[in-house]
Image (cartoon, helix red, strand yellow):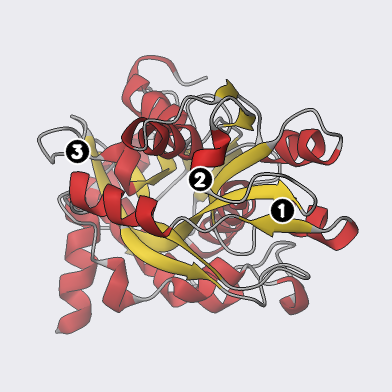
């Protein structure tokens, strides 16, 4: 835990951040000794893997910086920890972040947009559930508590006037419960393919329920964070292409992190995108979502402002 906004920045790091950073041998600014915590997600989630890869590459490429990951429930849990000062960086879906008036929670800003998550509604192949409204009264995993999956699936059920028997399970636990017949369906708002669903599909026939009307309803009711999308036929074994809704994910940061430190982190993310992998070394296990990270979309964080250090990096790149 990092109570009461304790950033654990060395005095040298703060002075360097205030006065202009030195340049290390890697070409990135020298930030002194900085220890940061990055909130990721639950077991079986893309947040856990891509967050770990981001932490590894920031630690390698920003001299003096060390980033450790903190497992979490995901989006809303990460926002809570950021606001409480328990972590310095965190991943979140855009819909869970934007407040009712379209602003970001106080004290937080974005480093960049990373990739888009797709909402999965998964059932076993022999299930009697054929469409969204068939969830009425069924045992449905809504994702882990405080996750983006919970936030979006509850919003969707409310819009559709569907009363499901909601369960709160991580993605890995949801897939296991679905396989074992303990639940009838699971929601998962995540990257494509997501490890938990991919591993389930490799061992047991599954189906994805289309969410066409539901995507339109979300887009109409909450303009900004939602867009119609397609989960491709190549994502999961034996599963055809399925229409659904997509939500952007952003990397958040506390506003009180030094501008030059955030500038260096931003540059590392976009310079080393091609090196971000699940295992950290094996290109055969590259994070598919990492290929969505690019400068053109990275600046598109909707109504969430960029941290001044991130905004400066995007400006500098255009010069």
Q: Earlier in the sequence, mark 2 or mark 1?
A: 2
Which residue is denoted by mark 2 in the rendering? 132
Q: Earlier in the sequence, mark 1 or mark 3?
A: 3
**Residue drawn 64% across and 64% down?**
193
Q: Is the residue marked by circle 2 packed among few (<14), some (14-19), or many (20+) residues within 10 Å?
A: some
Q: Is the residue marked by circle 1 packed among few (<14), some (14-19), or many (20+) residues within 10 Å?
A: many
Is disc 2 in contact with disc 1, using a CB cutoff of under 8 Å? no
The outermost residue toward the left is: 101
* 3D distance between C-alphas at marks 3 and 2: 31 Å
Residue 296's x, y, as percent? 28, 78
- Give the quadrant of residue 151: top left
Residue 265's x, y, as percent? 39, 58
Mark 1 or mark 3, which is nearer to you?
1
The outermost residue toward the bottom is: 319
Which residue is denoted by mark 1 in the rendering? 197
In the image, residue 61 sits, relative to residue 148, either above or below, namely below
Left or right relative to 97: residue 99: left
- What kind of element bears circle 2? helix
- Give the quadrant of residue 9: top left
Residue 298's x, y, as percent? 31, 68
């Amino acid at each position: 835990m990092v109570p009461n906004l304790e950033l654990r920045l060395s005095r040298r790091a703060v002075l360097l951040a205030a006065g202009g950073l030195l340049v290390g041998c890697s070409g990135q600014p020298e930030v002194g000794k900085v220890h940061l915590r990055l909130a990721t997600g639950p077991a079986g989630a893309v947040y856990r893997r891509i967050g770990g890869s981001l932490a590894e590459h920031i630690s390698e490429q920003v001299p003096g910086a060390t980033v450790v990951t903190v497992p979490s429930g995901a989006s809303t849990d990460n926002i809570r920890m950021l606001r409480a000062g328990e972590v310095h960086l965190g991943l979140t879906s855009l819909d869970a972040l934007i407040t009712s008036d379209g602003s970001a929670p106080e004290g937080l800003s974005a480093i960049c947009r990373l990739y888009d998550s797709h909402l999965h509604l998964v059932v076993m192949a022999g299930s009697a559930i054929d469409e969204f409204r068939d969830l009425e009264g069924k045992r449905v995993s809504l994702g882990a508590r405080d996750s983006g999956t919970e936030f979006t699936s509850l919003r969707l059920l409310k819009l559709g006037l569907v009363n499901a028997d909601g369960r709160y399970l991580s993605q890995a636990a949801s897939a296991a419960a679905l396989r074992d017949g303990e639940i009838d369906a699971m929601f998962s708002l995540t990257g494509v393919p997501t490890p938990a669903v991919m591993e389930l599909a490799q061992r047991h026939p599954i189906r994805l329920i289309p969410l066409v009307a539901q995507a339109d309803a979300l887009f109409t009711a909450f303009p900004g964070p939602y867009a119609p999308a397609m989960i491709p036929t190549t994502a999961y074994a034996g599963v055809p292409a399925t229409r659904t809704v997509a939500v952007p994910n952003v990397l958040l940061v506390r506003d009180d992190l030094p501008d030059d430190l955030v500038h260096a982190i931003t540059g590392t993310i976009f310079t080393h995108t091609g090196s971000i992998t699940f295992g950290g070394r094996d290109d055969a296990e590259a994070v598919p979502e990492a290929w969505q990270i690019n400068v053109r979309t990275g600046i598109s964080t909707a109504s969430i402002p960029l941290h001044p250090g991130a905004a400066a990096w995007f400006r500098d790149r255009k010069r």
